Image: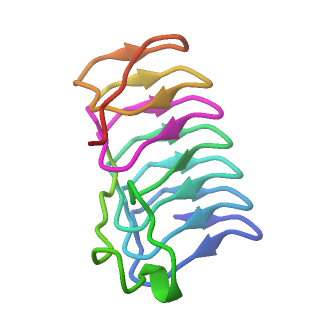
Amino acid sequence: MTYIDDFAVIKERVTIGENTIIGAFNIIESGAKIGKNVTIQPHCVIARDSVIEDNVFIAPHFSCANDKRPSIGEHGQSSNKKPHKEFPIHIGEYSVIGTRCTVAPGVKIGKRCFIKMNCNIYDDVPDDTTVQKNTTWSIDYD
């Protein structure tokens, strides 16, 4: 049985697997794919078209984005900017994401990773990796 708590916002085309818990005040953007046996605790933002595999735990106040340079203007575009391009995130199975973590656009977190609280992840994280605060895990966006 899947459980969705009060005040969670789930947009269109989202898929959620069995036995998953979506906590209160979460925002799950369009097209996100959430596996089975996943727990997403309160106050999290899951970006559009992101993938969260099976058996993942996400602690409160997690956020991610899917656009490296958001455009300004109506519907995310203006006449002098290139069309909107998305970079969804991907979180591998059995990974744990700590409280107040942020994941940059296009990042892939591997399987069985442990991202400790208050981390900002800017680059891919290989399988079976532990990331802790003050670890440089960055990518150049140019």
Picture coordinates of residue 106, whole percent (x, y): 30, 49
The answer to whether 132 is drawn above or below residue 120 in the figure is above
Residue 74 locus on image (x, y percent): 51, 88
Question: Is residue 91 shown left or right of residue 11?
Answer: left
> Observer-nearest residue: 15 or 2?
15
Q: Is residue 98 magenta?
A: yes
In the depicted structure, whether residue 41 falls above or below residue 118: below
Identity of the residue drawn at 34% across and 47% down: 54
Instruction: Compare residues 12 and 47 and report the one nearer the observer.
Output: 47
Q: Name the residue rendered at 34%, 75% in the picture.
A: 81
Q: Which residues are magenta?
A: 91-110
Give the vertical position of 127 relative to 85 (above or below): above
Q: Is residue 60 above or below residue 44?
A: above
Looking at this view, name the residue that lies furthest to the left: 126
Quadrant where the C terminus is found in the figure = top left
Residue 62: give x, y in percent of width and height. 59, 43
133 in magenta: no
Q: Along the line of sight, which residue is nearer the eye, 89 or 98? A: 89
Q: Quadrant of residue 85?
A: bottom left
Picture quadrant of residue 133: top right
Residue 118, image quadrant: top right
Tell me which secondary structure the magenta stretch mostly adopts: loop
Q: How many marks?
A: 0
At horizontal 36% and vertical 79% (from top left) the residue drawn is 80
Residue at the far right: name it: 6
**Residue 24, position as x, y percentages in the image:** 73, 59
Outermost residue, front side: 80
